[in-house]
């Protein structure tokens, strides 16, 4: 545990003016006190609108990442839409510092790709940035292909990686491939914080899963998550589930 980059996230509740106002009114935040993190992989799960992406964004910004994604070297802004939650968070850090880092937002990865092209078009003597993503424009690949260009070429380990719904670009087979690559990066002493709806991703062994409830974030076991229960029930009897759903 002493080897991880972030041990714990704390909400400085005394800095919050009102828990009746966004984003502090969200279920993920209203009853938030502390969030201990697994040294390798922590998942944050919950319904749409529960605040998991807002919380993840605040953690990323508090660390120093660009709100729209990328590494700490990205500073572009297409729309100033991030909340003030990051100002009320304290990140309890370990003694080890990461050599790499990336904040992935599925909804704004297009903007990251655009900024890479902008920076590569500027005069300079160093290698083009796209070289570190496999050498092919991310805009010339599918969403899933460009995501794997990031995973396989840009991320090199010893890093803090914060992913918001990475499964948005991935088929089930590609999600399995992502788990394999994630495990390689974990073995290279990386730490992940991931918000997801995917029961495939959250099956990663020994990860900690936090489910957002009306009472805040609650640690849950994989087979107790709604994502696992609903998926298993449907796959065990798709015809019966559809008949009940559509009747």
Image: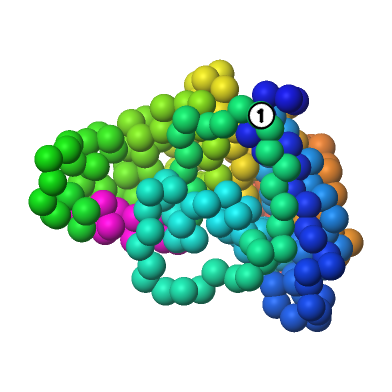
Q: Residue 129: x percent and y percent?
A: 24, 42
Q: Secondary structure at mark 1?
A: loop
Q: Is residue 129 magenta?
A: no
- Name the residue located 67 percent from the left edge and 24 percent from the top edge: 3
Residue 101 rendering spot, x and y as whole percentages: 48, 39
Q: Foreground residue, 238 or 150?
A: 150
Q: Quadrant of residue 1?
A: top right
Q: Residue at x 32, y 42 (%)?
A: 145
Q: Does residue 244 appear in this view? A: no
Question: Which residue is located at x 78 percent, y 58 percent?
Answer: 11
88 up-or-down from 235: above or below: below
Q: Is residue 193 visible?
A: yes
Nearest to the observer: residue 176 or residue 217: 217
Name the image quarter holding the C terminus: bottom right
In terms of depth relative to the viewer, which is nearer, 131 or 139?
131
The x and y percentages for residue 107 are 45, 61
Name the residue: 57% across, 22% down.
Answer: 189
Q: Which residues are magenta?
A: 107-117
The quarter of the picture where residue 246 lies is bottom right
Q: Residue furthest front?
A: 95
Residue 179 in the image: x percent, y percent? 53, 30
Q: Is residue 92 left or right of residue 179?
A: right
In the displayed structure, would residue 154 be above or below residue 34?
above
Q: Which residue is mark 1?
A: 95
Query: In this view, which residue lies farthest toward the top?
Result: 187
Q: Is residue 197 above or below residue 3?
A: below
Horizontal side, residue 73 vs residue 214: left or right: left
Please say whether residue 115 is one of the residues in the magenta stretch: yes
């Amino acid at each position: 545990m002493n080897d991880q980059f972030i041990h714990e996230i704390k909400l400085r509740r005394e800095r919050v003016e009102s828990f009746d106002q966004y984003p502090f009114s969200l279920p993920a935040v209203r009853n938030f006190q502390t969030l201990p993190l697994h040294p390798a992989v922590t998942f944050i799960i919950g319904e749409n609108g529960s605040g998991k992406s807002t919380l993840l964004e605040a953690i990323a910004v508090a660390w120093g990442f660009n709100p729209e994604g990328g590494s700490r070297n990205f500073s572009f802004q297409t729309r100033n839409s991030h909340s003030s939650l990051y100002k009320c968070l304290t990140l309890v850090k370990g003694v080890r510092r990461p050599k790499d880092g990336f904040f992935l937002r599925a909804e704004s990865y297009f903007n990251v790709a655009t900024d890479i092209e902008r920076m590569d078009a500027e005069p300079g003597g160093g290698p083009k940035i796209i070289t570190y993503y496999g050498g092919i424009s991310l805009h010339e690949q599918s969403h899933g292909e460009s995501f794997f260009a990031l995973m396989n070429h840009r991320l090199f380990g010893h890093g803090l990686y914060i992913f918001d719904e990475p499964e948005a670009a991935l088929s089930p087979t590609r999600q399995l491939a992502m788990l394999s690559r994630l495990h390689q990066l974990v073995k290279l002493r990386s730490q992940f914080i991931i918000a997801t709806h995917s029961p495939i991703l959250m099956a990663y062994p020994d990860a900690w899963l936090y489910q957002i409830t009306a009472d805040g974030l609650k640690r849950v076991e994989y087979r107790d998550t709604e994502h696992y229960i609903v998926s298993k029930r449907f796959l065990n009897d798709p015809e019966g589930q559809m008949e009940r759903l559509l009747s």
